[in-house]
Image (tube, rainbow, N blue to C red):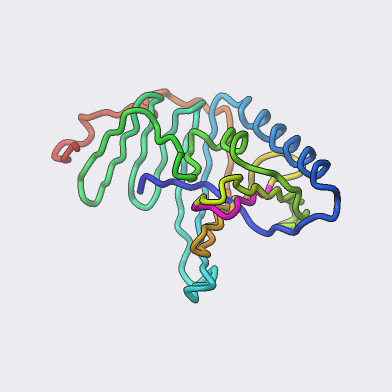
């Protein structure tokens, strides 16, 4: 449950020279990071789907998993798979509501396992990846520019990450992560709001709310 990925779809190699393509892709990612990083906070409602051709699992075979996250700087409050993840900038609290258990980790997860964590969403691409521009696809009346990120580490658990960026707003719309086992995890942002009148208490763990929970 601590491996939270946030992801996107469809890559096609370009006939443009790699260096030019790479520079264009990085420039777009920098613009997205700057735009979304300028907000005081963000609220994102998303859905997740899975597919794995090798295992005979097609996208849509299972209903989507829904979640929502509040972000402010590196702090976040994530509701996902019936669990709550609270990172206050120093500690990560993972609250398993079904099992009534809470685990506490010093500092956020560092992402050395190759997974993308919420607090690193806007900066994860800056190290360890090569970039390529993908297709522009019309999705629900929006022009979505895809950028493919290929891990430099050949032993990475991730084969590629594909980010779908709204060409008009410069917001992330889709994120697809393809694993070395052939599994594709697809996240779609269904609602995005920014600069909300948000209390900092949402990013703080309040022990009094979880009486009877086992704290690990």
Q: Nearer the viewer, residue 154 or 132?
A: 154
**What stretch of residues is rendered in magenta?**
157-164
Closest to the observer, 81 or 50: 50
1 left or right of 17 in image? left
Q: Position of residue 24 (x, y in %)?
A: 79, 40
Which residue is located at x 23 percent, y 33 percent? 209
Numbered disc total: 0
The foreground one among 90 and 154 is 154
Q: Is residue 111 above or below residue 67?
A: above
Query: In the current view of this chain or complex, which residue is farthest to the bottom?
Result: 56
Position of 99 relative to 207 (above/below):
below
Q: Is 59 positioned to the left or the right of 84 in the image?
A: right
In terms of depth relative to the viewer, which is nearer, 93 or 41? Answer: 93
- Which quarter of the picture shows residue 59? bottom right
Q: Is residue 87 magenta?
A: no
Q: Quadrant of residue 107?
A: top left
Magenta span: predominant SS is: strand
């Amino acid at each position: 449950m601590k491996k939270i990925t946030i992801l996107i779809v469809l890559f096609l190699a370009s006939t443009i020279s790699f260096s030019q393509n790479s520079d264009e892709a990085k420039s777009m990612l920098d613009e997205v990071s700057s735009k979304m990083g300028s907000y005081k906070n963000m609220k994102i409602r998303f859905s997740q789907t899975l597919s794995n051709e090798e295992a005979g699992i097609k996208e849509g075979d299972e209903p989507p998993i829904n979640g929502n996250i509040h972000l402010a700087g590196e702090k976040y409050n994530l509701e996902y798979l019936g669990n709550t993840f609270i990172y206050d900038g120093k500690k990560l609290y993972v609250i398993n509501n079904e099992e009534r258990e809470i685990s506490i980790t010093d500092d956020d997860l560092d992402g050395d396992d190759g997974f993308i964590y919420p607090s690193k969403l806007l900066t994860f691409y800056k190290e360890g990846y090569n970039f390529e521009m993908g297709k522009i696809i019309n999705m629900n009346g929006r022009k979505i520019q895809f950028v493919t990120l290929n891990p430099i580490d050949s032993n990475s658990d991730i084969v590629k990450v594909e980010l779908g960026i709204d060409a008009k707003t410069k917001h992330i719309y889709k994120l697809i992560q393809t694993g070395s086992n052939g599994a594709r995890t697809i996240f779609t942002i269904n609602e995005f709001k920014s600069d909300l009148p948000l209390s900092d208490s949402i990013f703080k763990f309040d022990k009094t709310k979880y009486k009877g929970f086992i704290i690990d």
